[in-house]
Amino acid sequence: MLYIMVLEEMKVEKIKMTTPLVEMDGDEMTRIIWKMIKDELLLPFIDLKTEYYDLGLPEREKTKDKVTFDAAYANQKYGVSVKCATITPNKQRVEEYNLSEMWKSPNGTIRAILDGTVFRAPILIDSIKPAVRNWKKPITIARHAYGDVYKATEFRVPTNGKANLVFTDKDGNEIFNKEIYDFECPGVLQGQYNKDSSIRSFAHSCFNYAINTKQDLWFATKDTISKQYDQTFKLIFQEIFDECYKEKFEELGITYFYTLIDDAVARVIRSEGGYIWACKNYDGDVMSDMVSTAFGSLAMMTSVLVSPDGKYEYEAAHGTVTRHYYRYLKGEDTSTNPMATIYAWSGALRKRGELDGLNDLVDFAGKLEKACIDTLNDGIMTKDLVGLVEPGVKATAVNTATFIKKIRTRLASKL
């Protein structure tokens, strides 16, 4: 059977690429899966052209994190990248990998350089229904990936004392000084910020993504409480929409809708899905996990970083699956879900094909995703999904390697 399959694949002429993808390798179990996907699902069918960067933690340590910056600048040059999940080190990881310092998140570095917005959407299959029963279409979370609590300055207040918010302009003039709180006991203090330029980039990315995918766009903050910070987001979005995108939205029959974040949550739960929900950084971080879990699994969540000038970075929404990696190192069988990582590759290949006018590459991406869905709908899946299927659906749990080989069989039959 395998011999026949190999012969059939030999008849398929490999799809040619003209411009390379930027390939960013990663860490732990996802690094192992990365190689499986390339060996089984890509290299047999595509004359794969990539500019390779190893963002594994040992290489980041070796290059003092220069490799992360090089990869991001290559993404700017070539326009499309695909990224494996990577470790963001904490104190325990510093000791485990003998690091010279606690290197920053590669995702954060790349997002800052591309000035991008993260769009995350669930992968749906027939046998797993959302926990919110009226959801019928994917909900895409657009997360502003700059500032807020992630760049905040914090202080543990040790004793009684007064805290003030002070702003001094570039000439040294103090133009704002307001008391935050007169502490009568110990407490905690936090100052966060954002920039009009980043908010504008966020808005442009969201409006362009809505146009490209022909979906309605929702945006939500809490401007009734945060009358400067959140209101700035609201006003900039409305200004850019009115000046640049209103006519195109009307032409496509899609809408832009603003509401308060608490109202948005209520509307989302009551909706049937099928739109983009734009959120500030922290809101997007929380809501993307809520949406992915309600639809099934974080391992069934696509993620793409889009810059306002049209650069794309595709990745899995989840981490490096450390627990499975330690088991793998012991020689134990693992059943890690590779779907999000496969879709990172298919998304990047599709976009590369669209930008370069390579219809065969675009078509391949669609067939790869269809082969994945067909495998799952046939009841062949990794262990994380078996417990989520609808009653009466027969599902068989397989390990990661077997799951990918089953996808390859279905993919080969479509080419």
Image: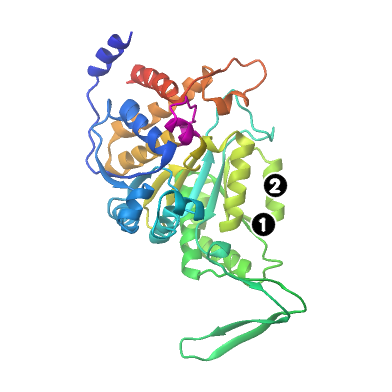
* Helix, strand or loop at mark 1: strand
Which one is nearer the viewer's eye here, 71 or 324?
324
Residue 132 lies in what quarter of the image? top right
Q: Position of residue 334 (x, y in %)?
A: 48, 27
State if disc 2 and disc 1 touch (CB < 8 Å): yes
Could you tell whether 163 is left or right of 366 in the image?
right
**Residue in the picture at 56% in, 58% down:** 281
Answer yes or no: is residue 280 visible: no
Q: Which residue is mark 1?
A: 259
Residue 62 placement: quadrant: bottom left
Region in magenta: 324-340
Question: Disc 1 to disc 2, how far (Cα)?
Answer: 10 Å
Is 23 inside the magenta-drawn segment?
no
Three-letter amino acid code at the position of disc 1: Thr
Asked if residue 51 is positioned above or below residue 191 in the image, the reply reads above
Give the residue pinned by disc 2. 267
